[in-house]
């Protein structure tokens, strides 16, 4: 069981896929609240103007679709932080395809980023989560984790797999006092929807997903939100 002093501040979060979209919204929200945040993305730090406006955010450029990239992220956090209070697996990518027309290796690439990165980092950072008085792991799944749809073969399969990983983390780490939640949002206004015919007002803002994560974390330690489904008010697209 975690033994750290619950009054220790600042709290420490690790957020993947932080350069934009939901990951960025999570980083900015936690930074505003005084958290210390270790985050990563594929972009170089010099390309991210928002970093200069953050107070206590540390950023690493790395490719989590590779084992080497995950190892680099894990070692960086292990050498810099004393514990991990919140781990947010947000790194991921979207493609549109079918089982028969998917380009060679596309499924493997999506699985590597959307699923294996969360698997590898969870294993590596487990000891640091156990040092926290309130350890919590969040995975950014999708409503595509619940229902397959035409044209989303590789994406749906990877998100189904990520939800399966989340369920296993919940079961296996229950005795360690680690809470685990799956976030399952519908359409969020991020780069994945760039070029779509839908107006911004029809999609959810990324900050709403970030605030759902914070709400779950701030609940009583006796409670866990196992699955949090968020959808646009007017329904899925």
Image: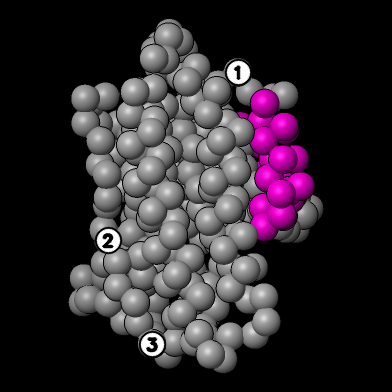
Inspect this view and state whether residue 47 appears: yes
* Residue placed under numbered mark 1 in the picture: 82
Say which residue appears at 67% left-offset and 82% top-offset. 104
The span from disc 3 to disc 1 (Cα, nearest Å) is 45 Å
Neighbourhood count class around disc 1 (C-alpha, 10 Å): few under 14, some 14–19, many 20 upward: few
**Coloured how?**
one colour
Mark 2 in CB contact with mark 1 (< 8 angstroms): no
- Please check the rendered image and state whether residue 72 is part of the magenta-colored stretch, yes or no: yes
Neighbourhood count class around disc 3 (C-alpha, 10 Å): few under 14, some 14–19, many 20 upward: few
Element type at mark 3: loop
Residue 202, image x, y percentages? 31, 77
The span from disc 2 to disc 1 (Cα, nearest Å) is 33 Å
Residue 150, image x, y percentages? 38, 87
Neighbourhood count class around disc 2 (C-alpha, 10 Å): few under 14, some 14–19, many 20 upward: many
Left or right position of 131 against 78: left
- Please check the rendered image and state whether residue 205 is part of the magenta-colored stretch, yes or no: no
Q: Earlier in the sequence, mark 2 or mark 1?
A: 1
Residue 103, image x, y percentages? 65, 85
* Residue 133 to residue 220: above or below: above
Nearer to us: label 3 or label 1? 3
Element type at mark 1: loop
Say which residue appears at 26% left-offset and 70% top-offset. 232
Mark 3 in CB contact with mark 1 (< 8 angstroms): no
Q: Which residues are magenta?
A: 50-78
* Residue placed under numbered mark 2 in the picture: 230
* Residue 107 to residue 136: above or below: below
The span from disc 3 to disc 2 (Cα, nearest Å) is 21 Å
Residue 9, image x, y percentages? 49, 17
Nearer to us: label 3 or label 2? 3
Say which residue appears at 59% left-offset and 40% top-offset. 121
* Residue placed under numbered mark 3 in the picture: 150
């Amino acid at each position: 069981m975690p033994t750290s002093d619950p009054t220790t501040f600042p709290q420490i979060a690790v957020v993947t896929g932080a350069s934009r979209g939901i990951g960025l919204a999570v980083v900015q929200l936690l930074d505003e609240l005084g958290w210390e945040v270790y985050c990563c993305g594929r972009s170089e730090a010099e390309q991210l103007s928002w970093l200069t406006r953050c107070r206590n955010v540390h950023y690493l450029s790395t490719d989590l679709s590779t084992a080497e990239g995950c190892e680099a992220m894990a070692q960086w956090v292990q050498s810099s932080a004393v514990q991990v209070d919140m781990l947010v697996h947000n790194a991921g990518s979207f493609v549109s395809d079918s089982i028969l027309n998917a380009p060679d290796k596309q499924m493997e690439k999506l699985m590597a980023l959307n699923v294996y990165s969360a698997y590898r980092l969870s294993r590596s950072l487990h000891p640091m989560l156990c040092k926290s008085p309130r350890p919590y792991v969040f995975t950014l799944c999708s409503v595509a984790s619940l229902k397959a749809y035409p044209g989303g073969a590789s994406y749906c399969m990877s998100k189904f797999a990520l939800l399966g990983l989340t369920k296993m983390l919940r079961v296996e780490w229950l005795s360690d006092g680690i809470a685990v939640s799956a976030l399952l949002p519908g359409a969020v206004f991020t780069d994945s929807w760039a070029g779509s015919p839908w107006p911004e007002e029809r999609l959810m803002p990324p900050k709403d997903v970030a605030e759902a994560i914070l709400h779950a974390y701030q609940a009583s330690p006796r409670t866990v939100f196992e699955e949090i489904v968020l959808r646009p008010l007017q329904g899925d697209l």
